[in-house]
Amino acid sequence: MGPCLLKCRWKSEPIVWELNGSSHGVVAPNYVVANHNPSALFCEQLRFSKKIMGHVIAVANQKGGVGKTTTAINLASSFAAAEVNTLLIDCDPQSNASSGLGLTKDPERISTYHLLMGAASAEEALQRTELEQLWIIPSHKNLIGANLELVDGERREYRLRDALAPLRERFQFIVLDCPPALDLLTLNALVAADSVLIPMQAEYFALEGISELLDTVERIRAALNPELSIEGVVLTMLDDRTSLARQVMAELKKYFGDKLCTTAIPRNIRLAEAPSHGKPALLYDVRSRGAESYIRLAKEIIAHYFAQLTEVAADATPELQGAAPELQEAATAEARVEIQGEQPGAEQPQAREAESAAGAPAPMDGAEMEKTA
């Protein structure tokens, strides 16, 4: 099985993301950043299987000012720059993710509010951005009223999840920018999500607030969305020269283990300037430390995603648990082939030769079956 390779490069020199294939799936990520000319960007497509549904990531933390919107914008943009169809949904009434991608305030435009109230479909709400494979569903200040209007609504916690269901086959990644509160809007986002990414600063108050969010995640997992997982905790606005930052990092590593993202986002003036120009950091200044950090974070999440798919492939056929080992291995291999985006039928001639060599009869096609009959 060939390697799954993603190359994103500027025309002069390359930026390469490699997800190296092996007999056990995609397990070995490699990342190289070179100097580049920001005149034109093109990418060789990452081969996602069409059978893989969209992965929904909620960027959430009830504490404000920790970089949720900056993370949502730049993470989604990094996915899209890798030629992966990506959707960013602004679930915050402040609409900062919308303005950060260049959308002006328009009360007539379909927004997340209309999705939650059932007044429009998600397809109708899609808006294009400067990046070819990045779409956004914008927000509006009316969204604050949804907290009150949905109190007595039917399936109030599942409104966003139901609205996104038709889009999960169209987008490989859907990123939800949550408001800084544990209200019905955040609840809808967490119920709709497959995983939650938690941005936080390396400060004491951030440590206090994260325990409340984790408690909320556990409650949602128990009652509303048992599949919800922690995508990771990413440190933002990090100044690793301070002893406090190093102490907080050590505590988080001790508590979260490998759930603490290897990539940390440094304090960077370009990240702060980019929203005022209505651009993500990689379009505003791709050479900046902030832009490169979010590209590395996207790579890390993609690698984690493929590792999960490999585990799914290994457990894709529970009905064969009691079957012969040869059948279990064949079924797992077929699932892995589908994840890599190859044609399962391409390996059938080799399989038939192996069966014939072992003395087992090869499967008959339609003509052979008619002759036998």
Image (cartoon, rainbow, N blue to C red):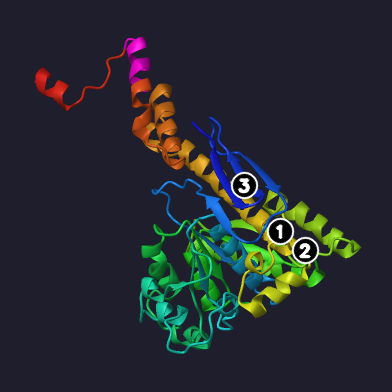
Q: Can you give x and y, in whole percent of width and height, for residue 44 in the image?
A: 52, 48
Residue type, numbered disc 1 = Ser
Residue under label 1: 293
Task: In this rendered view, identify the residue nearer to me: 90 or 7.
Answer: 7
Q: In this figure, what is the number of numbered marks?
A: 3
Name the amino acid, label 3: Trp
Residue named by callout 3:
17
Q: Earlier in the sequence, mark 3 or mark 2?
A: 3
Name the residue located 53 percent from the left edge and 80 percent from the top edge. Answer: 103
Q: Label 3, label 2: how many angstroms apart (C-alpha)?
A: 21 Å
Question: Is the residue 332 above or below the residue 9 in the image?
Answer: above
Q: Earlier in the sequence, mark 3 or mark 1?
A: 3
- Residue that numbered label 2 is attached to: 266
Residues rendered magenta in the picture:
351-359
At label 2, the amino acid type is Pro
Query: 75 and 372: which one is in front?
Result: 75
Which label sits in the foreground, 3 or 2? Answer: 3
Q: Nearer the viewer, residue 181 or 46?
A: 46
Q: Please rate how many residues cluster around mark 3, counting C-alpha atoms within 10 Å: few if below 14, some from 14 to 19, many from 20.
A: many
Q: Is residue 318 magenta?
A: no
Quadrant where the C terminus is found in the figure:
top left
Numbered label attached to residue 64: none
* Circle 2/circle 1 CB separation < 8 Å: yes
Q: Residues within 10 Å of mark 1 (few under 14, many from 20)?
A: some
Gap between marks 3 and 1, in whole Å?
13 Å
Question: Is residue 63 positioned above or below 265 on the image?
Answer: below
Q: Left or right of 202: which side holds 55?
A: left
Residue 66 makes an appearance in the image: no
